[in-house]
Image (cartoon, helix red, strand yellow):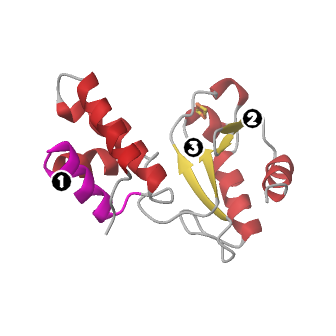
């Protein structure tokens, strides 16, 4: 069973106060809950947010499933998010994510055996002029080649 920490609950309630509609607070609330649940949203997290926010689970679930920034499965210590939108796609993003997965011995969305990495493809991260690019944690890595991407990934502990 998942329960928000007292601080997490306080943050969610603060988000509810910021908006006229409770539904508008779902995006930030999911972020808060995801951070407290090892980086992913489980059905128990949806239940807890539904209880705290006094919203139907379906209203929270529909937001969660629509956006790629909410993880639906447990993720590795490092979440490698490769942008797959137009500019990055035209500059080899698909081949890049395939290369990263094959080098790490994993598939998109699956944790590596050692639990260190999860690779996913995500929608535009707003750095289209320096495609292809990826985000790991809160850092952006741009103008990537297969080699530079793997050097960055291998340097992570
Ligand atoms: S298309 Fe990749 S950052 Fe915008």
On the image, the x and y values in percent for residue 63 come to: 29, 44
Secondary structure beneath label 3: loop
The C terminus lies in quadrant: bottom right
Q: Residue at x 40, y 44 (%)?
A: 7
Q: Badge 1: how crowded within 10 Å, few (<14), some, or many (20+)?
A: some
Asked if residue 90 lies left or right of residue 53, the reply is right
Q: Is residue 42 magenta?
A: yes
Q: Mark 2 points at which residue?
A: 142
Secondary structure beneath label 2: loop
Magenta highlight: main SS? helix
Of residues 10 and 82, the one nearer the viewer is 10
Give the magenta range. 41-56
> Where residue 84 is drawn, which disc sits there?
3
Of residues 47 and 148, the one nearer the viewer is 47
For label 3, being within 8 Å of ligand 1 is answered yes
Q: Which of the two marks, 2 or 1, is nearer to us in this view?
A: 1
On the image, the x and y values in percent for residue 13 come to: 27, 36
Q: Name the residue under label 1.
A: 57
Query: Is residue 52 something that shows in the picture?
Result: yes
Q: Of label 1 and label 3, which has the lower sequence position?
A: 1
């Amino acid at each position: 069973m998942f329960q928000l920490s007292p601080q997490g609950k306080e943050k969610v309630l603060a988000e509810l106060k910021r908006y006229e509609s409770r539904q508008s607070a779902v995006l930030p609330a999911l972020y808060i809950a995801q951070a407290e649940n090892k980086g992913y949203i489980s059905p128990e997290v949806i239940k807890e947010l539904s209880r705290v926010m006094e919203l139907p689970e379906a209203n929270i679930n529909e937001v969660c499933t629509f956006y790629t920034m909410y993880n639906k499965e447990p993720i590795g210590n490092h979440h490698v998010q490769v942008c797959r939108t137009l500019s990055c796609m035209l500059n080899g993003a698909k081949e890049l994510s395939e290369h990263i997965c094959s080098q790490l011995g994993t598939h998109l969305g699956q944790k590596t055996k050692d639990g260190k990495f999860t690779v996913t493809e995500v929608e535009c991260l707003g750095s289209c002029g320096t495609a292809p690019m990826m985000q790991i944690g809160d850092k952006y890595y741009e103008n990537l080649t297969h080699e530079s991407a793997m050097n960055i990934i291998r340097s992570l502990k």
